[in-house]
Structure formats: C-alpha cells, structure tokens
Image (tube, rainbow, N blue to C red):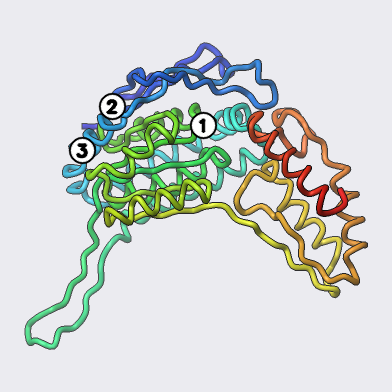
Amino acid sequence: MPATKPKAAATKSPDAPLVLRQYLDGRWVEGTGTREIVSTNPADVRKIVARGRGASKADAEKALSAAQAAFPAWKATPAPQRGRILAQAAQLLRAHKEELARLMTREEGKIYPEALGEMEKGITLVEWFAGEGLRLGGVSRPSELARNLLLTMREPLGVVSVITPWNFPFAIPAWKLAPALVAGNSVVFKPASLVPAMAVRIVEIFAEAGLPPGVLNLVIGAGSELGDVLVEDPRVKAVSFTGSNEVGSELYAQGARRMKKCQCEMGGKNPLVILSDADLPLAMESAAFGAFASTGQRCTATSRVIIEESVADKFVQLLVARASQLRTGNGLEPGIDMGPAVDESQLKTDLHYIEIGKKEAKL
C-alpha cells in the first residue's frame, strides 16, 4: 500500500525552520534521543535551518525492524515496478530542484550554482537507476549435462544501512539509496547531522513517489550513538558509507568481523600533475576549480600540485592571481565564487592546517 504524502516539514515560508522528525515504518515521529539537532546556515549561524530531537539507539532499532518487516514484500515487487517508483521520485525531485538547491545552500553553504549542479547530478543518478528496474538480471551458461542450463540470478541482500556525509547532501544519498532500492533492498538512512533538512526532504519525496512503509527509514543523529547499531545489528546485511578514513576503516573492520558487505568511500589526497609542456592557463583553471569548488570540502578536491620546476614559479603566479579574484560569501548572493566552511569546527581545522603549512612552505 503506497505511503501517504508525509507532512514532517511543513513550513509557512521557504526559509522558515524545518521541524526535524524521524521516518520510521512510513510515519514521521519525534526522536527519543537526548541530543537536539540544530542545523544553522553557515553563512549566518544566527539563522536556524532545521531543529528537532535526534534519534536514539531504540529509534535505530525500530527503523531496522521496520526495514526487515518490509523487505519480503519489497523483494517480491517486480523490479520494473520498483523502477517506476524511482522514476516518479526523479520527476518529483526535478519539480523541486530549485527549492532543494536553495535549501542545500542554506544548510551546507555551497554556492547556489553548485547546489543546482549537484541536484542535476543526483536526479540523473536516480533516473539511471530507475532504468535498472528493466535491466536487472543474471546470466545463463551452457552446461556439460544434456538438457541442463546453468543460471545465475541476482537477489537483494536485505536490510541496507546507508550512512552519508554533509558535503554532498543530495548526490551521495541519491547514488546510494536509488541502487539499493531498485535492487529490492530495504534501507535505513542516516545522514550527517549537519544536513538533516536535506535528508528529510529527500525521504519525503521518495515516500510521495510511492515507496511502501518501512522500505525507506530515516534516523537523524550522531554516528557515535547510532553507528554501532546500523553496522553490527544482525539484521543489517550490507553497509554503504561515505566519510572519513578513521570512521570508515573502523566500520569496515566491524562489518568484516560479521561477514557483512561494506562499501566505503573515504578521504583522498589528490595530486594534479603538471609537466613543463602543459597549457599553464588551462592547468591553472583546472587546479583552481579542483581546489576551490565546494569550498574545497570534498574528497576529490585538488589538494596537491606536482609540477616540473621549470614552470613552477609561473604556475604559482597564475594561481595566486586567480585565487585573489575569488569572491567569498553567502552562496545565495549573486557573484559569489565560494561559500563558507560548513561550520566552526571545520573552519578551525582549516586554519590549523594553514598554520602547519606555514611551517613547511611559503603562504
């Protein structure tokens, strides 16, 4: 039976604070955790984007129970039908694209054009995986025995935990939720606590598209409080995680001890290699975009340049000139090239690494 249109975040104006709720078994309920989740605009921390009580371990366990109970019927739903629900979600997401991009900028801080680009990428991902509903299948092989055929069939795993970061609050959930759902798995989704409003809107739209209750559940809370439940509970058959190396490596070890499938996308230290015969203005633009887009807050950001010494000084001059032209500020304002750090803690980390760098090189 399709879920009714949720009303977890109804507001009087587009910029009014959202009231955060957990989404358990097709119902929006208040969290029972001890911590209040408050999401603020990193361009103006006085402005609250969303707030509400966080989830407790008991809430996470309820989410897993709902997902496990919903799994058999969702598994039995024909894959093309599952794909059609995702296709409907993609249409709804596209209809709300500008609204969601604005919310993303208000909550995460990236500039509005970048938020629009992330929305388009994520919607395209959902559309692609919707089409997988018509392409899912195994393979057949000839057998050595007469009148026999060897078949391989793909089946869903069961309950999947999806744990996502704050730097791409729509695209990363999109490319984790959509394939898990179209393949017939049920999901418990835990977003980063810095971007809960985006997660609420994503789940609202997937529910409106027709996902049955319990197939997709949302718990909002600290990873330190919910992570163990979402990884170690025997009902969880697979985990998809994007985040830090420290958390990911521990999560992977926890999953391995229990023979669970764990997919981890973690940090990077990505070099751009520039040789002496390079088109230096083009190389500089590539480096600037790689380093400064999304305020540099992404695992794929250009964080090092390895360059032949003969062109190093010229490249540095070009890059410094380009960086000096960047306008920083509120990502909703026109003409802004780079938004703020996501929160005060991240800003302090950035400044700390600058101080380390000044001991090793010229600023």
The amino acid pointed to by label 3 is Ala
Q: Earlier in the sequence, mark 2 or mark 1?
A: 2
**Secondary structure of residue under mark 3:** helix
Foreground disc of the pair 3, 1: 3
Reading the image, the residue beneath label 3 is 70
- Quarter-wise, where is residue 353 in the image? top right
- Of marks 2 and 1, the one in the foreground: 2
In the displayed structure, 213 sits above or below 255; it is above
Give the tally of numbered discs: 3
Q: Which residue is mark 2?
A: 58
> In terms of secondary structure, where does tag 2 sit?
helix
Q: Which mark is residue 96?
A: 1
Point out the tag, 2 or 3, that comes first from the N-terminus.
2
Residue at 73%, 50% (x, y): give it: 291
Above-or-below relation of 126 to 349 = below
The part of the image, by quadrant, that contains residue 4 is top left
Which label sits in the foreground, 2 or 3? 2
**Is residue 44 placed above or below 100 in the rendered structure?**
above
**Percent x, y for residue 58?**
28, 27
118 or 247, which is in the foreground? 247
How packed mark 2 is, by other alpha carbons closer than 10 Å (few <14, some 14-19, many 20 or more), is some
The residue at the point 55 percent across, 48 percent down is 121
The dot on residue 19 is none
Left or right of 215? Residue 53 is: right
For badge 1, the amino acid type reads His
